Amino acid sequence: MTHPLDRPAWTALRTRQQALAQGEGRALRYDGDYAIFAATGDHAPPSLAALGALIGATGPAIVLQKDPLPPVPGTRVGKHRMGVQMAAETLSGAADMDFLELGDADAAEMLALATLTEPGPFFAQTHRLGDFIGIRHEGRLVAMAGERMKPDGFTEVSGVCTHPGWRGRGYAGGLMRVVAERILARGETPFLHAYADNRGAIALYESLGFRLRCDMNVTVLEPD
């Protein structure tokens, strides 16, 4: 049996985030204002053909899944890296920091912070994928964390970033812990992704209680 998180974008776009799905049937992707992920439910030739047609019509996408991705008709691989997926059944320690709820009024600053720090793909409406919280200094947004993919029973912790001038103060870990605690309180399991060679980030996530679930293939597909 395939685990729901083996292809998290596929599971999310067929369940809790189906309102954001583009495509039909065998291949889906997020509305490009929200996220850049695309997925199929299997590697059958019709599914891969549908994915290629979808990318050809809508532009580049990232396929994030446990299994290696076979060649997709009509596309080329722009980049491939190995990542890890981690999940937390319980958390270590407790959150103890002042933070603010973020929303539409903060969207421009959130996008600017994400563009500067590159925590992962972040677009004009990414902040609407879930709840986001942040920290301000003298009115300036300097750190944030929030939610992204939402398969049934799970929510991804994402968008975690800190302005370079305010790093080393524990903001990223503290905000992540708050986000993950809220997810657990809803009866869901928090999960996240990182590149496999990002040992510093993985060590931070492990200190919070996240544990490796599986390796993940991160493949950027572009129209051929």
Image (tube, rainbow, N blue to C red):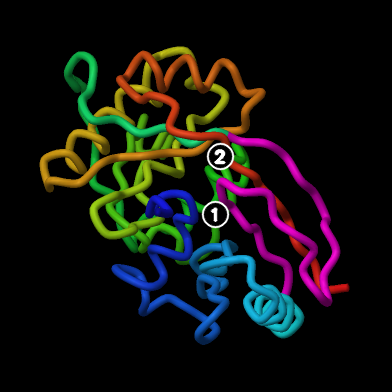
Residue occupying the point 56% across, 39% down: 119
Q: Is residue 174 left or right of residue 144?
A: left
Q: Name above or below for residue 87 compared with residue 56.
A: above
The residue indicated by pointer 1 is: 122
Instruction: Compute the Cα span from label 1 to label 2.
Output: 8 Å
Q: CB under 8 Å between callouts 1 and 2?
A: yes
> Mark 2: which secondary structure?
loop
| Mark 2 burial class by Cα count in 10 Å: few <14, some 14-19, many 20+ | some
Quick one: quadrant of the C terminus? Answer: bottom right
Give the total number of marks visible in the rendering: 2
Q: Is residue 194 left or right of residue 140?
A: right
Residue occupying the point 66% across, 47% down: 218
The percent coordinates of residue 75 (x first, y second) are 82, 70
Residue occupying the point 19% across, 34% down: 181
Q: Is residue 65 magenta?
A: yes
- The range drawn in magenta is 59-83
The percent coordinates of residue 192 (x first, y second) are 43, 38
The percent coordinates of residue 133 (x first, y second) are 29, 42
The residue indicated by pointer 2 is: 119
Quick one: quadrant of the N terminus? Answer: bottom left
Q: Residue furthest right?
A: 224
The percent coordinates of residue 219 (x first, y second) are 71, 52
Residue 96 position by quadrant: top left
Q: Is residue 76 left or right of residue 86?
A: right
Residue 44 position by quadrant: bottom right
| Mark 1 burial class by Cα count in 10 Å: few <14, some 14-19, many 20+ | many
